Image: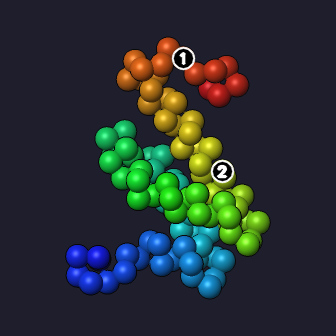
Amino acid sequence: DSDRGRAPVLPALLYDHSPLVRVALVNAMGRVLVQWSPKDRYTHAHIILPLLWTGTTDAYPDIVRASEERLAEIDHQCRVDMVEAGIAEDLQPEQK
């Protein structure tokens, strides 16, 4: 959208007046990042992770909680990616 002189949609939704819109955005973006292939996950992480980090500072606890939960899922998936790529040997037992 910035190519066309418009503000990007995702960051604008993060500041929507409705908490339901913000929590839906956080949940959708977090789940998409986890479900994408590793190539797509790391190609687009620089766009999505700041949205989730911003959600951890929201005034509504449900949005903070959803952001933290999605970030934990992404953390776990990134650890799995590293094991599968041979970068790390194994996950810690409590993280399997």
Q: Residue at x 73, y 65 (%)?
A: 62
Q: Mark 2 packing: few (<14 Cα in 10 Å), some, or many (20+)?
A: some
Give the image quarter of residue 21: bottom right
The answer to whether residue 53 is visible is yes
Q: Indicate the position of residue 95 as horizontal and vertical percent values.
A: 65, 28
**In this orientation, which residue lies closer to the viewer: 86 or 36?**
86
Decide if residue 38 is on the left or right side of residue 66: left
**In this orientation, which residue lies closer to the viewer: 2 or 62?**
2
Q: Please, what is the three-letter code of the amino acid marked with disc 2?
A: Glu
Image disc number at residue 51: none
Decide if residue 41 is on the left or right side of residue 21: left
**In this orientation, which residue lies closer to the viewer: 57 or 14?**
57
Label 1, label 2: how far apart the Cα atoms are: 22 Å
Tag 2 secondary structure:
helix
Q: Residue furthest top?
A: 89
Q: Indicate the position of residue 63 as horizontal and vertical percent values.
A: 68, 66
Give the image quarter of residue 38: top left
Would you name the residue on which mark 1 appears?
Answer: 90
Q: Which quarter shows the C terminus?
A: top right
Would you name the residue on which mark 2 appears?
Answer: 69
Q: Indicate the position of residue 43 as horizontal and vertical percent values.
A: 32, 48
Tag 1 secondary structure:
loop
Decide if residue 70 is on the left or right side of residue 63: left
